[in-house]
Image (cartoon, grey):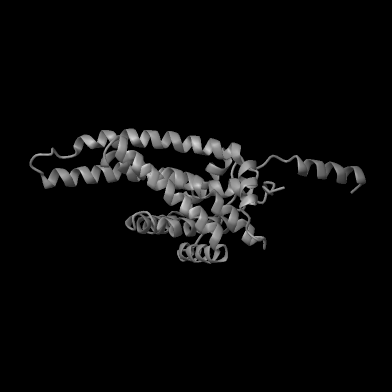
Amino acid sequence: MTENQVQQHTQSTETAPLPFAAPFHQLHMAMPLSWVRKGWEDFKRAPKQSLGYGIVVVILSWIVTGIGLKVGSYWSALILLSGFVFVAPVLAMGFYSISRQLERGQQPSIGRCLVEKRKALGNMMVFALALLVLFLVWARAGSMVHVFFPDSGAMDPWKLVMFLAIGSAVGSIFALLTFVFSAFSLPMICDREADAVTAIVTSVNAVLRNKRVMAVWALLIVGLTAIGFLTALLGLAVTIPVLGHATWHAYRDTIDASAWPANDAQ
């Protein structure tokens, strides 16, 4: 091959279009538990940074609950607090960055986290906007479901069961959509210079092709988050960081995003 041919081949390789979605690996059923274990290990390796972010999450949750109780009712507070499902993936960006730094053998730095967030800010905002729209639709659906709540007079157990069933079904649909969209997309945005649409398509594709494993992963997320809620939100200071770190390892084990340039802090 002549020198000109080599140069042409190199140029064509460099300018080759990126795939519409990153390829994924097939997962096995034991992997979700290994992600939680790795997330706990990351938490122990960077306790100050992880716990600091976790405390911020708890404070934000308390503030949201207080606002809901002050301007509305217990129902309003529940709706706002349930919206945590939609904002948690964005809040977890710091945990992805910490795990990424640990993976590279670096001392975790909040400053480096902020630099990486700033570089990915545009795509993060696009993703956050999509989640905001989803949350607003869910909130509207939640307020409509409230009409099924039994009257304050004689409480009909059957009507109460129907109300809880309908509310849970509607909430589960929106929570499932959020999970499918965000399972791998935000870690990919944190790790690579990939746009939000590509990251979301990658996440949806990987989740749908690993349904059983991702169902186990979703149940673990729900369980650990529930523990945090059952401890007056205090437990979120630990469970959310662990889940954030675990999500990073889930992304690394599932998605091959090597075709995109690394999102390195400068």
Q: Position of residue 56 (x, y in %)?
A: 47, 50
Residue 139, located in which quarter of the rendered image?
top left
> Along the horizontal axis of the image, is 233 left or right of 103?
left
> Which residue does the image show at 28% across and 35% down from the upper left?
72
> Which residue does the image show at 40% across and 45% down from the upper left?
84
Is residue 153 visible in this depiction of the protein?
A: yes
Q: Position of residue 119 (x, y in %)?
A: 65, 42
Foreground residue among 2 and 13: 13
Residue lying furthest right in this view? Answer: 3
Foreground residue among 60 and 190: 60
Residue 8 drawn above or below residue 92: above
> Which residue does the image show at 63% across and 55% down from the upper left?
109
> Along the horizontal axis of the image, is 128 left or right of 168?
right
Foreground residue among 160 and 166: 160
> Along the horizontal axis of the image, is 2 left or right of 258?
right
Residue 212, located in which quarter of the rendered image?
bottom left
Q: Where is residue 137 in the image (x, y as percent from the top left)?
A: 37, 33
> Which residue does the image show at 46% across and 66% down from the upper left?
30
